[in-house]
Structures are given as structure tokens and as C-alpha cells.
Image (cartoon, rainbow, N blue to C red):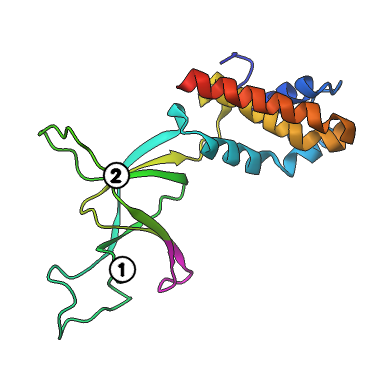
Amino acid sequence: MPASVTNPADVLNLCLRRIGYKLRVGSLFDGSTAAKAALDVYAQTRDEVLVENDWDFAERNLTMTLLKSAPVNGYVPPVVWNPATNPPPGWLFSYQYPPDCLKVRAVKPVPLFVLNFDPQPNRFFLANDNNYTPAQKVILCDVPNANLVYTGQITDPATWNTGYTDSLAAALGRRLVPQLIGLNAIQPAAADEAQTVAMAETEQG
């Protein structure tokens, strides 16, 4: 990644240069026309581009925090389902959703020393558990002691790779063009974004 891209203002200036905007910003909070327009879309666009591809730098792995589990022997009277302590029927475990998780990539069992030559994906479901106040987002699955692979909300431009930075600058350009350049420039900006995303996907494999 170019050394000059180390903060959000650098990303925005890269975007402005791509769309032909003549002025630069000092920060996203400098009060300029471009900065004020970018503030409305920057964070949302950053996160959307993060989840569009499984960017290597954004991958996070952690041992999931168990919230609820189903009875070992199932719901056999007198044991009945209790939403306060059990996940929804049909699921064995309810895990905490990480606060920095933008996209769940996979739920995996604890790694074993025995090689698995035919790994299979584990099903999972994202839900809102209304038994918490306020409601809490959870991950439902049937994997005990599960590990989570997810896309994290990576906000520091200094840790991004070049492909992602270019993709974000292109996506920002498409959204800022109508305000800063004019409606006639939307189509070229969209074409530029599509080309940049395609190149980034090729680089990442």
C-alpha cells in the first residue's frame, strides 16, 4: 500500500483525485464541501466494501463465547425448552456475536491433530435473541466449543491492502460524484469502480 494512505483523509483524497475533483481535504472534519459530503457515506461504504470480498487482511479468528445450549439428552419431559437458557428449537448452541463482526465466514470445530481430508461446512444462523434487554444478536449452530472465522470491522487505513484501498476509493467516488462533480459523471465513476473491484478480486485470487 502506498505509504501516503494512512488515514481516512488520505483515502478521501485518493477518491477525489480519481473523480477529477480539484480540491483536497485536511481531514473528514475540516468542514469543506467534500469532507461534509464524505462524512455521510464514508463509514457505511467502508464496511460495505469490506464484506463484498473475503479480504485476507480483514479475516479474524476467535473461540466463540457460549451463551446458551440445548439439554444433552434433548427436550424430554420433564425437561422442556426454556428460552432463557436454551437456544431456539432446532439448534444446539447459541453463541455471542462479536461486536466487530461484519460478516460471518465460517463456524468451525476445535482443530484436531488428526487431518480432515474432507472438511464440510457447518450450518449456522444469525438471529436476534429477544430474551436479552436489549435484544442481542447471536450465532446459532450445532458445533460445540466452536471457533468463528469472520470479517472484522477494520477501520485503520494503515492496515488495509492496496486492492481494498483502491476499491473503497472507487466506491466512494461513485457516491460522491453527484454532489461534487455532477450527475453526468455517475456512469464513468461506476465503470471505474467495477474495473477496480475486478482487479482487486484477481489480485486476491
What residue do we see at 59% from left, 13% from top? 3
Is residue 129 highlighted in magenta? yes
What residue do we see at 71% from left, 21% from top? 14
Q: Is residue 83 left or right of residue 52?
A: left
On screen, 163 above or below 54?
Answer: above
Q: Amino acid at mark 2?
A: Pro
On screen, 12 above or below 129?
Answer: above
Question: Under tag 2, what secondary structure?
Answer: loop
Range covered by the magenta-colored residues: 127-136
Query: Extreme front residue here?
Result: 118
Residue highlighted by disc 1? 87
Of marks 2 and 1, which one's residue comes earlier in the chain?
1
Query: Extreme bottom residue here?
Result: 78
Alpha-carbon span between mark 2 and mark 1: 21 Å
- Name the chief secondary structure element in magenta: loop
Residue highlighted by disc 2? 121
Query: Extreme left residue here?
Result: 114
Question: Under tag 1, what secondary structure?
Answer: loop
- Which quadrant is home to the C terminus? top left
On screen, 131 above or below 56?
Answer: below
- For residue 7, which quarter of the picture? top right
